[in-house]
Amino acid sequence: MTAIESFDSIYLDLSKESGRCRFAETGFGWKPNGGGDTFTLDHNNISGAQWSKVAKGYEIRILQRNSGIIQLDGFQQEDYDRLSKVFKNWYSTALESKEHALRGWNWGKAEFSKAEITFNVQNRPAFELPYAEIGNTNLAGRNEVTVEMSLPQDGNDTATANGKGKKAAAGKDQLVEMRFYVPGTTSTKKEADGEEGEGSGDEQEAEKNAATLFYETLMEKAEIGEMAGDTIATFLDVLHLTPRGRFDIDMYEASFRLRGKTYDYKIQYDAIKKFMVLPKPDEMHCMLCIGLDPPLRQGQTRYPFVVMQFKKDEEVTIDLNLDEATLESKYKDKLDAHYEEPLHHVVAKIFRGLANKKISSPAKDFITHRSQYGIKCSIKASEGFLYCLEKAFMFVPKPATYIAYEQTQSITFSRVGGAVSTLSTFDITVAMKGGAGSSQFSNINREDLKALETFFKLKGLRVKNEIDEDAKLLASALREQAMEDSEDEVVKGGADRGSADEDEESVDEDFHADTESDISDPEASDDDSEAGSASGGESDVDDDEDMDEDGEDEDERPKKKKKTG
């Protein structure tokens, strides 16, 4: 046997690129073919090794004494004898051959080992889940436990054995969450059998929900609760608008944790992309908005923003759990040892110091007609507040929407709705560049129109005001209607009494003599009637010779009038 055993085309921890692996008496090393950092492991840190068939041929899983696991993929079946002798003679460890369960069953037994959780089907491992790859866990129900994977912060981050979530960077598709259904109860008398075993029933106080015990064991093994460090500051029972609920905030050196009654979230400071302090228009509350990438996950729901709400008059006194040397070396001019001021100021300052992020606030160039920074409006059926920042729009609380000015193609003011909303409110439609869609903010108070239009033009944004155009068209239409109405009034000015004037004129011309005779001599009405009928008969003959009978009828009518008179 030579002093060095070398193997080519070997992948370290599911890395994207293969490399050369060399084993020696002092340990082993791996170097990528394309150049890069070399990984080495001392032989004193090797506690065990397993050989199994995987997708890329055969794999060696090396168990470290410090609870880590290293995967080496790409070996051939004929390499087993050489590697078995290497581990036996140089590292005093047997290379154990393991076969995986291939039945495809989704029920089995979960076992917690030193470095990983193993899901066994008929005493064969179906899959292993290293604790280093677990980012968070939650009790999703009475018998259900959710396990979230650690994801790489950088897409170019290749897999190495150092750091959490590195292995997930290897593929285009990444596993982000698993759920375990753990039924029944279990006994806590024996630690080894307490995770999945059935309760004995001898002592009722020893019985515990199996899912709860599974969750607590995983929290302890994966060091999720401890976060691998001491808490720098803790804030209890903080109201969150997104995701909805009250959470305790534990702040650590590299991350912070939100602890709720149902869900816990662990968030790295590197995932914070935006941090905003937004005063609420009620002048009683202040909102802190944290933009995250990757976003929080709760089942199928994603939360790219965390929105907290604080009372402005709520004071707090807190001493940070940091010694003077650490404050001076790491957080000089970033954090203070003691704070005594409003709660939202303290939380914002500590976040700024630990995450090293700039705090954004509403632009000073815009203010509403009520001297506020937030505009009350809605996205579809969700009401909230729209803030105009120096470089973007921000709508909170739900759905929290961030739109950068540089991504905005145009802004359109429009008026949509019935008569009431038309008079008092308007809508804003923000079109994105590159055909990325648009967002509409509805039911904005009409009194804020001019201030918004002035602010957008100040920021160099393209603004189209359809409200003024509609107003001009409406005014033009009203003027035309008014002119038509005035013309109608001129034409109909002398005919307000209908045909009364025409009747009066005809009576004056035709019956003036008769009327005077009737008034002056009532007794001569019969003679006049006969004379009138005779003259009427002559006129009828002149007009139409066939109207003789009508003349006779006219002779009878005065007689009837005489009887009634």
Image: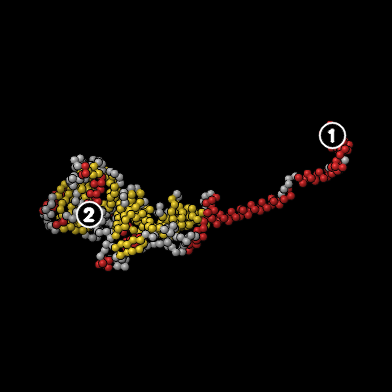
Q: Which one is nearer the viewer's eye here, 307 or 147? A: 307
Instruction: Tell me if mark 1 has few (under 14), some (14-19) or many (20+) residues whose alpha carbon lies within 10 angstroms of its own.
Output: few
Report which quarter residue 101 is drawn in.
top left
Q: Position of residue 414 (x, y in %)?
A: 51, 54
Helix, strand or loop for disc 2: strand
Q: Which one is nearer the viewer's eye here, 36 or 387? A: 387
Q: Which one is nearer the viewer's eye here, 556 or 273? A: 556
Does the residue at mark 1 contact the one at mark 2 (Cβ under 8 Å)? no
Q: Position of residue 49 (x, y in %)?
A: 16, 51
Q: Does residue 114 appear left or right of residue 151 in this picture? A: left
For the C terminus, the image quarter is: top right
Q: Eyeballing the image, is 268 above or below 541?
A: below
Could one spot residue 499 in this view of the protein? yes
Q: Residue at x 59, y 53 (%)?
A: 474
Q: Position of residue 515 (x, y in %)?
A: 84, 42
Could one spot residue 131 in this view of the protein? no
Amino acid type for the residue under numbered disc 2: Leu
For the N terminus, the image quarter is: bottom left
Q: Does residue 217 appear left or right of residue 500 in this picture? A: left
Q: Which residue is mark 2?
A: 12
Report which quarter residue 543 is drawn in.
top right
Which is more N-terminal, label 2 or label 1?
2
Q: Does residue 43 appear left or right of residue 480 in this picture? A: left
Q: Eyeballing the image, is 210 above or below 235?
A: above
Q: Which residue is mark 1?
A: 562
